[in-house]
Image (cartoon, grey):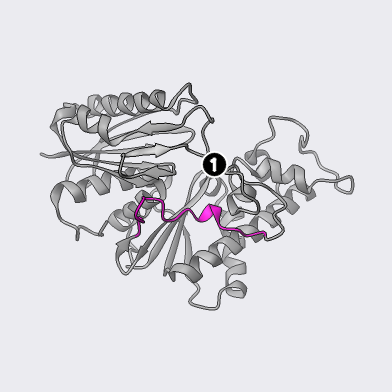
């Protein structure tokens, strides 16, 4: 039996799985993403969870045929690394990935993807509905999209295609994104920025039980209060507006038949996130209005997409339920 590794490197967690030729997961492991002191600490965490996933599967790391990595960006594909990740502390300037993994696993077949590109590979490999034109959108600590057009997953020359969270949705630029630019979709609707947007919207006219001034205010607090708190409802309504504008931009750019939505914000609040997009898209889109569905892979979308990428690379069969 051949074995494959998939890795999901996120701003919050590092996850790894080991699977077989059919993408069946045989072992897994996870850990928190180190917040410093340097990118090497993150690399070491990736190697550690891969070793642990191999141990959980009872597989020698050197028996692995190929590995795939779905990672936060920006990426430097030529170096096989993450370069100055926007959602990690500034002290983390570079995270080497493909070289250290190749050394651990004893294989040169290590493929690095933007995390959302891995997500769309996973949907095309595992989902029942897998048209040639589709998008995997994540709304989590960041926002991004993996895009398949005419059956081909878009990567871009540097691996950074699909950074749709940095599309400008608000030309007034009322909020600044974590990347330092104004008016970006991610600056309003990512899990990291929902509390900041709530504070921005709040004024004396609004009565709310939300702890607006508390440093611990979270996106979960806002969504949990919706339905019982008029101000929370207002915030969620505005988030729905910006999310619909962002998805409309994606639809006009890539013409997908299906948009699968994942990430912690969407997975934890599917109706509050997806329903406003579905309701508003027909008024925003002049082309085909796609189906908007919750990801079929749950929290495993990126890690299983990375695994699928490894299987495709290792078997050389680009037609196995999908093409990367």
Q: Position of residue 223 (x, y in %)?
A: 65, 45
Range shown magenta: 154-170
Residue appearing at x 62%, y 61% in the figure: 276
Q: Residue furthest front?
A: 78
Q: Residue furthest top?
A: 37
Q: Position of residue 85 (x, y in %)?
A: 48, 38
Q: Position of residue 29 (x, y in %)?
A: 34, 29
> Could you tell whether 133 is left or right of 140 in the image?
left
> Could you tell whether 67 is left or right of 299 in the image?
left
**Foreground: 194 or 300?**
194
Q: Magenta segment: does it hold 5?
A: no
The N terminus lies in which quarter of the figure?
top left
The C terminus lies in which quarter of the figure?
bottom left
Residue 252 lies, with reference to residue 92, above or below; the image says below
Q: Magenta segment: does it hold 167?
A: yes
| Disc 1 target residue | 141
């Amino acid at each position: 039996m051949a074995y494959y590794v998939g890795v999901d490197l996120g701003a919050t967690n590092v996850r790894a799985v080991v699977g077989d030729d059919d993408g069946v997961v045989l072992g897994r492991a996870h850990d928190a993403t180190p917040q410093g002191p340097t990118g090497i600490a993150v690399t070491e965490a990736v190697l550690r969870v891969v070793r642990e996933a191999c141990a959980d599967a009872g597989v020698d790391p050197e028996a692995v045929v190929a590995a795939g990595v779905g990672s936060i960006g920006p990426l430097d594909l030529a170096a096989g690394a993450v370069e100055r990740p926007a959602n990690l502390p500034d002290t983390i300037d570079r995270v080497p990935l493909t070289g250290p993994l190749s050394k651990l696993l004893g294989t040169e077949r290590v493929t690095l993807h933007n995390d959302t590109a891995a997500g769309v590979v996973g949907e095309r490999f595992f989902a029942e509905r897998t048209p040639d034109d589709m998008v995997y959108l994540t709304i989590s600590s960041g926002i991004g999209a993996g895009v398949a057009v005419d059956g081909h997953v878009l990567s871009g020359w540097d691996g950074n295609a699909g950074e749709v969270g940095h599309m400008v949705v608000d030309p007034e630029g009322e909020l600044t994104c974590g990347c330092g630019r104004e008016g970006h979709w991610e600056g309003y609707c990512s899990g990291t920025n929902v509390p900041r947007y709530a504070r921005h919207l709040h004024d004396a006219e609004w009565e709310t039980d939300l702890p607006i001034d508390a440093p611990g205010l979270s996106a979960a607090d806002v969504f949990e209060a919706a339905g019982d708190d008029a101000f929370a409802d207002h915030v969620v309504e505005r988030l729905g507006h910006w999310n619909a504008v962002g998805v409309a931009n994606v639809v006009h750019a890539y013409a997908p038949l299906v948009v699968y939505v994942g990430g912690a914000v969407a997975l934890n609040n599917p109706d509050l996130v997806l329903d406003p997009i579905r309701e508003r898209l027909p008024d925003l889109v002049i082309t085909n209005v796609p189906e908007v569905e919750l990801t079929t892979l749950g929290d495993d979308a990126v890690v299983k997409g990375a695994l699928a990428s490894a299987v495709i690379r290792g078997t050389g069969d680009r037609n196995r339920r999908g093409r990367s």
